[in-house]
Amino acid sequence: MASITLKNLNKIYPNGFVSVKDVSLTIEDGEFVTFHGPSGCGKSTILRMIGGLEDISSGQIYLGDELLNDILPRDRKLAMAFQNYRLYGYLSAYENIALGLKLRNMPRNVIDTRVKTAVKFFGIEDVLNKKVTELTDAQKQKIALCRATVCHPKVLLVDEDFAHGSDELRADMLQDIQRINKELNLTVLYVTNNYEEATSLDGKLILMKDGQITNQ
Ligand code: ADP
Ligand code: MG
């Protein structure tokens, strides 16, 4: 089950600033959920706590029945697509996509099948052997999404800074993450401070202000 449950979630930074205040929310398996609100309202903090990149001050986060609070980020069945793609320029597209699978000691033939299935899904089979430095931004973005999905996560977390280069890259990314949701059946959590974008997407819309959800 890839539902996500947040129970009375709080984040207090060491300087005393409360960026997430008592947020409780249930996201069903397979939902596409968009978090929208002004810059600084706590959207990224919530995503980072779910991903395990930020400590939880109090409250609980569950993936299905599993309490995530004390589980290491790499052991959570989640994938994250954040800023700058974080690709390794000196490695090929193939090696970048395969990296997470290699770190999990998957057999070579399984890795090969998964990488090839992923590039086919995104229509970029022709770039597999190119170095990342030879790719266009649109191709790099798709490579990053391949890398996010090959480990077969249950949930994909996408922050708005993932696609920030141009309107075209952003439109591409939105199309891709909606396909990931519908065709690969991943639960997707997407963060944006763009109102038009937030209201144009199918799925559940969560509105936030000052660390709280305002439409519950
Ligand atoms: P959003 O993604 O909605 O723009 P964030 O979740 O990044 O907002 O941040 C929420 C609030 O927490 C902001 O006011 C931000 O300044 C504050 N904040 C973020 N990181 C820290 C930190 N390390 N220490 C103190 N305050 C922080
Ligand atoms: Mg943010």
Image (cartoon, rainbow, N blue to C red):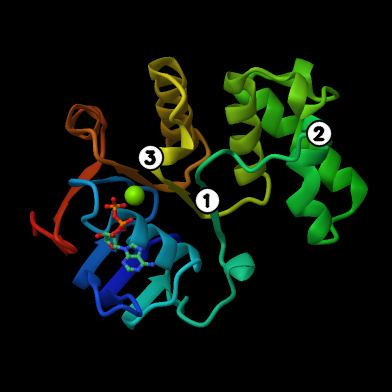
Instruction: Pick whichever, 133 or 126, lies toward us.
Output: 133
| Amino acid type for the residue under numbered disc 3 | Glu
Q: Which residue is mark 3?
A: 160
> Callout 1: few (<14), some (14-19), or many (20+) C-alpha neighbours within 10 Å?
many
Q: Compare marks 3 and 2 and give the one earlier in the sequence.
A: 2
- Relative side of 38 to 160, left or right: left
Q: Residue at x 38, y 55 (%)?
A: 29
Q: Which residue is mark 2?
A: 94
Instruction: Pick whichever, 11 or 77, lies toward us.
Output: 11
Farthest residue toward the left?
215
**Alpha-carbon distance for marks 3 and 2?**
25 Å
Q: Which residue is mark 1?
A: 80
Determine whether 166 is above or below 25 in the image: above
| Amino acid type for the residue under numbered disc 2 | Tyr
Local SS, label 3: helix
Asked whether mark 3 lies closer than 8 Å to ligand 2, one says: yes
- Relative side of 37 to 121, left or right: left
Q: Tell me the quarter of the picture where residue 19 sits.
A: bottom left
Q: Tell me the quarter of the picture where residue 211 sits.
A: bottom left
